[in-house]
Image (cartoon, helix red, strand yellow):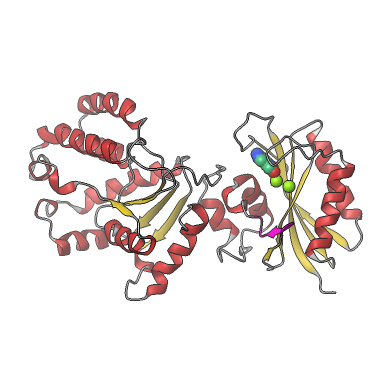
Amino acid sequence: MAIQTAYIGLGSNLGDRREYLNKALAMLAQANQVELCRVSDFIETSALGDNPQPDYLNAVAEIRTSLGPEELYEVLAGIENSLGRERKGKWASRTIDLDLLLFGEQVISTEKLTVPHSQMHFRSFVLKCLVQIDPGIIHPVMKVSIGELASRLNDCDFALNSDLPQLISIAGNIGVGKTTLAKKLAEYFSCEILYEPYDTNPFLPEVYAGKYELSLDSQLYFLTRRVEQLNQRVLLSKKVYISDYVFDKELIYARALLDSKQLALYKDIYEPLSKNVCNPVLVIYMHDSEKECLDRIHNRNRPYEQRIELGFLEEISEYYESLFEKWVKSPVMKISTSDLDYSKPESVEKIIQQIKFYAAVEK
Ligand code: PH2
Ligand code: MG
Ligand code: MG
């Protein structure tokens, strides 16, 4: 029988959690045809789920085994049972939970067993532990490294909620190519695009022409239009939307364009309004050099954008970086515009395939 490397996720949030993890690992090490190779640190994590629950202690173990995946699954269930695991439903607290995350490169979908674990790409408590063992492991369905999957979550845990509006927001600097990508994606998913209403802002041309005293007016115009467009009560449950901007860019531009007194007032208005805005289920964060962005701005030749300077784009890039360093609202998929070649369908298809794992986009 061929020997396979498999990864087991361990979790406990009842009783002596450390003891349960240690006992489960010892039993795993002693199981027939199983060799325990590496174990991640035990990490303390808040429970993911609707109901308040005690915090978890999580870990991941790497094993080598000559068992088949179903046999291994039975061994895991046996260990869970002998450590007092009660089966009270999917999200109930438990003394021990042993999940088969990965089994070699096998893709298994039976009534009992889904491998790779269907939620692992949403869970930092799994990916962080896996990264400690080996960030280079490739997810056999997503075809992306575990390190890359972990970086999309920024230490947060998420769950697919297909009842919400499936808003996918594209973020990134001016001229990076957000609208072009939004159109390609919307065409594929046959869904609505929520475009930035840049050309109806009556203040913007004057601001870009140097009338900075109109900056606050211009930012408030954008703010109110976007709050309308992304209002939770306007977007429909389960429906897919692509926006060619991320709502939070409003604060970026306010910081870049307003003086401190204007910004203080702006924030007082922003704060309550932003509470009505729909959260994206996924952000696609596009990157390119500021020079390339500036060239695109010149090529597309929107008149009032022609005064934008490299330094301004650099400032905006930095603000975007710090926005996504702290981002906890959704997974963020970073892509480089230079990797996109619209003459090759597979370059957009690659992104589409990834989106399907984070948003309920299939009809
Ligand atoms: N397991 C769950 C549900 N929620 N949250 C954390 N932090 N860790 C878990 O292992 C976990 C969870 C269902 O198995
Ligand atoms: Mg589990
Ligand atoms: Mg389980």
Q: x%, y% of residue 329?
A: 46, 40
Q: x%, y% of residue 258?
A: 20, 33
User: Which residue is depicted at the point 36% across and 76% down?
Assistant: 344
Q: Quadrant of residue 155?
A: top right
345 with respect to 254 (left or right): right
Of 177 and 254, the residue lying toward us? 177
Span highlighted in magenta in the image:
111-117
Picture quarter with ligand 1 = top right
- Please say if 95 is above or below 287: above
User: Which residue is depicted at the point 38% across and 43% down?
Assistant: 236
- Please say if 154 is above or below 137: above
Q: Quadrant of residue 202?
A: top left
User: Which residue is depicted at the point 25% across and 59% down?
Assistant: 293
Of 244 and 337, the residue lying toward us? 244
- Please say if 99 is above or below 68: above
Q: x%, y% of residue 253?
A: 25, 40
For the N terminus, give its image quadrant. Answer: bottom right
238 with respect to 225 (left or right): right
Residue 65 falls within the magenta-colored stretch: no
Q: x%, y% of residue 42?
A: 73, 42
User: Which residue is depicted at the point 67% across and 49% down?
Assistant: 129
